[in-house]
Image: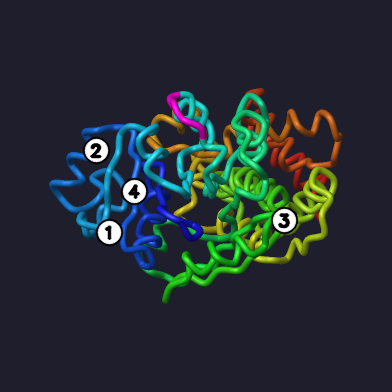
Amino acid sequence: MSFPGKIAVLGGGTWATALSKIMLNHEKHINWYMRRPEQIEEFKKTGHNPSYLSNVEFNLDRITFYSDITRVVEESDTLILAVPSPFLKSHLDKLKTKISNKFIISAIKGIIPPENLLVTDYLTQYYNVPVENMAIVGGPCHAEEIALERLTYPTIACSDINKAQIIARIFNNRFVRTSVSNDVAGIELAAVLKNVYAIASGICHGLKYGDNFQSVLVSNAISEMERFVDIVSPIKQNIQDSAYLGDLLVTCYSSFSRNRTFGSMIGKGYSVKAAQVEMEMIAEGYYGTKCVKEINDKYNISIPIADMVYRVLYENAPAREEIKILREQVLK
C-alpha cells in the first residue's frame, strides 16, 4: 500500500462535508462515516448531505457510507477526523478495533474536555497513535467557502514533514492551496484560542462596538495568542502566518463564523443556553474557553481577553461591564 492508502472522513457535519468535497477532487473513492443511519439514507436518495451544505452534490458511486465506526476504521488506512471536539470521545468509545496503525488527520479545531488535551495528545495518550502518524489541518478554511469553491489556504502540519507534503498534495486543487508546517501543537493551540477570541469579537459586535474597536481587540488577541503558544508549545513559529493570524482574522470577522455568531448573541443579551439552543450548531469556543482557563491555571500567562470570555460564559459576568473594563484597562 502506498501512503496514504484508503481515506475515510469521519463526521456528518458541515466541515466533514467540505473535506469530502476536497478529497473527491483528488481521490477516486472515499469512505465516509456518519453516526446517524437515517442521514446516510437521505443522502443516498438526494445525492447531497440533507443537513449540511446541501448545495454540494456528490457522485455516490465514489463514496462508501458507514454508520459503524469500527467498520469504517477497519476498511481505511487514513482517517480524517471532522467531528466537534466535545463529541470525539463518544465516537471513539464505540471502537472495537485499534487505530494506532492508522494515519490520522485531525481537522478538529478544538480541545478535548475535560482532559484539556489537544486532539493529537489525546490520541497518543489514549490510543497509542505515534506522533509521526498524525497531521492536522489548520488555517483559515471555512467550510461554507469551500462549498462555494472560493480560494482557501489551509496548512497541513505533521512532525514528519514528508508526510505533511504528501497530504498537502491531496488537498491541493484549483480552489485549495496548502502549505506545510511541523508546528502541530502550536497550530492546534492557535485554533482553540482563535475560537475564544471570535466569541469576544462577537460579544463586542452584539454590543454594537464598531470596526475600529474590533481591530484593536483583534490586535491585542494576536499578542495574547503569541504569548500563550510560545509558552505552552515552545517551538519556533511566525505568529503572522495564516495558520495563526489568518485563522484568527477569519474567525473573528466572517459571517460564517459560528463562534462569532455565538458571541454576538451573548452580546445582545442571550443567555449561554439560549444562544446554544437557537444556533443548533456547536460553537467550539464555548468548550475551548474553559479548557484554556484550566490549562492557564498551570502557566499563569497574561490572557485578559480570554479570561473575560470565561467570566462571561461561565461566571455569568455581565458582558457590557466586562468589555468596559477591557477597553479602559487592557486594550491599547
| Kind of residue at disc 1 | Val
Give the CA distance from mark 1 to mark 2: 15 Å
Relative to 82, 322 lies left or right: right
Closest to the camera, between mark 1 and mark 4, is: 4
Alpha carbon separation for disc pair 1 and 4: 17 Å
Residue 290 sits in which quadrant?
A: top right
Residue appearing at x 34%, y 54% in the figure = 30
Q: Which residue is mark 4?
A: 31
Please determine whether, in this image, residue 71 is positioned above or below residue 115. below
Give the answer, above or below, for where 240 lies relative to 73.
Answer: below
Q: Residue 283's spot in the image, x, y percent?
A: 50, 39
Instruction: Give the residue pinned by disc 2.
Output: 39
| Residue positioned most to the bottom | 174
Specify few, some or many for label 2: CA neighbours under 10 Å numbering under 14, 14-19, or 20 or more.
some
Q: What is the secondary structure assignment of the residue under circle 1?
A: loop
Residue beneath disc 1: 56
| N-term-proximal mark, 4 vs 3 | 4
**Residue 296 falls within the magenta-colored stretch:** no
Q: Main secondary structure of the magenta part?
A: loop
Instruction: Report the number of discs.
Output: 4
